[in-house]
């Protein structure tokens, strides 16, 4: 990484010491107009989501909390470095100098890139070694950069919050790897494959961080002004709608009306996933509520019925239920974006608003909203294809017996890869007996 960064990566105009000259040449009146001040709050929020939100969301397993949050940390720290290079080569390479210039928006995009691999990790949680997680991230970031370039640059799709490029791709990428790495004897680790009171509570911390910061995630790289403002509002409303629907459905499923923590940790976030593409469009506030409502239903039903069905029939072992929170809501979010884009009109957006929202400029100046909708749908299909095909190839690479992955009877257990503290100090049996007798005497 040090060598590659030394060869390729440099500061952009807004982070370079020549900013003062750049400001003068471009008639910029104040340092406040530096992009750092627009983007850094969003970057902080996204950064917290990647490291705290995703990390703690994966601590629900009773014996795998270190692995959940620790390997999440490892993947993200490695992935963001590789992402700066991969995305730079596709989006920010200066053909004259052969250098990549990075600024605060590059950091946000690198975090987005990591998110795809972290989603995939959710499907593999507890079943892979630390080295395998790095391989997943290496190929995941590479595939992400390629599919993102095809979807955003070649097809000219709009996907600010990444329903297609992040969630749909990451979900199907992880599922494909998990399917190839199927373990017929995983039941030998069944004693560890569950949660306890405290592990579920820790996972809920991750849920709440993700839930609170999701409006920032979806709006982080949208256009300044109305686009960013509208994206945050739509995401906020869709998330709130998801919570109510999830609680209602979870309670309805139980005869005694009790709630299932798995649904509350995951399906409550599905509205944010599905709003990633359409959030910057004029979907209307009640449209955002409808999206959250539908995703709450689909995601909760996924945990109740679809996950057990997939495990039984397709041999798909999906530890975190990535299929129900990322893959399906991400795919549907891409198609929702296609429908909303196709329905766009000048009367709703205004002429300038339509051009600005969909970037109908340059070679895409003649594109109509209907055509844009078609390309949005095509972009969703590209992300599914990249996820499934790429995941299958990476899965076969990970099947080589060289990665030090845990045995079937040691999955979901931190003891394989972590030094664990003693649960309690063991007292020699004789002393234990003596202490017991002393206490008895005191009672008498």
Image (tube, rainbow, N blue to C red):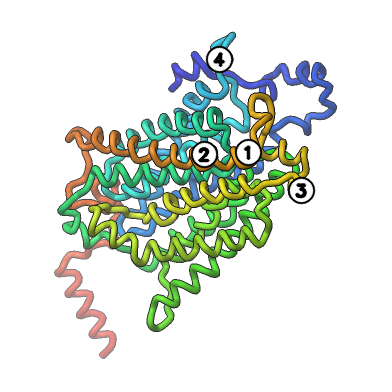
Separation of residues labelled 2 and 3 (CA atoms): 34 Å
Q: Nearer the viewer, mark 3 or mark 1?
A: 3
Please identify the quadrant where the C terminus is shown.
bottom left
Count of marks, rendered view: 4
Judged by depth in the image, the label closer to the viewer, 2 or 3, is: 3
| Of marks 4 and 3, the one in the foreground | 3
* Residue pointed to by mark 1: 221
Instruction: Kindly identify which residue carries mark 2.
Output: 112
Image coordinates of residue 111 in percent, x first then y, are 52, 38
Neighbor class of circle 1 (other Cα within 10 Å; few <14, some 14-19, many 20+) is many
Q: CA distance from mark 4 to mark 2?
A: 22 Å
Which residue has dot 3 on it? Answer: 347
| Mark number displayed over residue 99 | 4
Q: Give the x, y percent position of residue 443.
A: 28, 88
**Alpha-carbon distance for marks 1 and 2?**
10 Å
Secondary structure found at label 1: loop
Which residue is found at the position 31% from the left and 53% from the top?
A: 318
């Amino acid at each position: 990484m040090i060598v590659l960064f030394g060869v390729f990566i440099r500061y952009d105009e807004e982070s370079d010491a020549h900013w003062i000259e750049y400001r003068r040449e471009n008639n910029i009146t104040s340092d406040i107009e530096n992009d750092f001040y627009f983007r850094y709050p969003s970057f902080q929020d996204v950064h917290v989501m990647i490291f705290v939100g995703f990390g703690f969301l994966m601590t629900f397993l009773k014996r795998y909390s270190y692995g959940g949050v620790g390997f999440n940390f490892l993947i993200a720290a490695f992935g963001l470095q590789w992402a700066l290079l991969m995305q730079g080569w596709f989006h920010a390479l200066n053909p004259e100098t052969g250098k990549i210039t990075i600024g605060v928006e590059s950091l946000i995009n690198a975090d987005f890139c990591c998110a795809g691999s972290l989603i995939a990790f959710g499907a593999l949680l507890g079943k892979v070694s630390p080295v395998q997680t790095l391989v997943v991230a290496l190929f995941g970031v590479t595939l992400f950069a390629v599919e993102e370039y095809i979807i955003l640059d070649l097809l000219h799709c709009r996907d600010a919050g990444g329903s297609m490029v992040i969630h749909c791709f990451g979900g199907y990428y992880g599922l494909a790897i998990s399917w190839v790495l199927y373990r017929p004897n995983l039941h030998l680790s069944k004693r560890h494959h569950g949660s306890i009171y405290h592990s579920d509570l820790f996972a809920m911390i991750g849920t709440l961080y993700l839930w609170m910061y999701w409006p920032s995630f979806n709006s982080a790289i949208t256009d300044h002004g109305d686009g960013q403002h509208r994206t945050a509002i739509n995401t906020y409303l869709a998330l709130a709608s998801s919570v109510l629907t999830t609680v209602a459905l979870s309670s309805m499923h139980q005869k005694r009306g009790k709630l299932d923590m798995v649904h509350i940790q995951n399906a409550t976030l599905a509205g944010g996933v599905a709003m990633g593409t359409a959030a910057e469009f004029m979907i209307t506030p009640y449209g955002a509520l409808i999206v959250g409502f539908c995703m709450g239903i689909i995601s909760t039903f996924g945990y109740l019925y679809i996950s057990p069905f997939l495990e039984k029939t397709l041999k798909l072992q999906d530890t975190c239920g990535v299929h129900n929170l990322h893959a399906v809501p991400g795919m549907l979010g891409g198609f929702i974006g296609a429908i909303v884009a196709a329905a766009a009109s000048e009367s709703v957006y205004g002429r300038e608003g339509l051009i600005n929202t969909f970037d109908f400029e340059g070679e895409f100046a003649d594109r109509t909203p209907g055509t844009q909708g078609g390309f949005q749908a095509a972009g969703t299909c590209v992300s599914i294809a990249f996820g499934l095909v790429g995941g299958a190839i990476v899965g076969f690479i990970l099947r080589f017996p060289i990665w030090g992955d845990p045995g079937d009877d040691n999955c979901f257990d931190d003891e394989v890869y972590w030094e664990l503290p003693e649960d309690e100090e063991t007292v020699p049996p004789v002393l234990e007996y003596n202490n017991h007798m002393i206490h008895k005497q005191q009672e008498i």
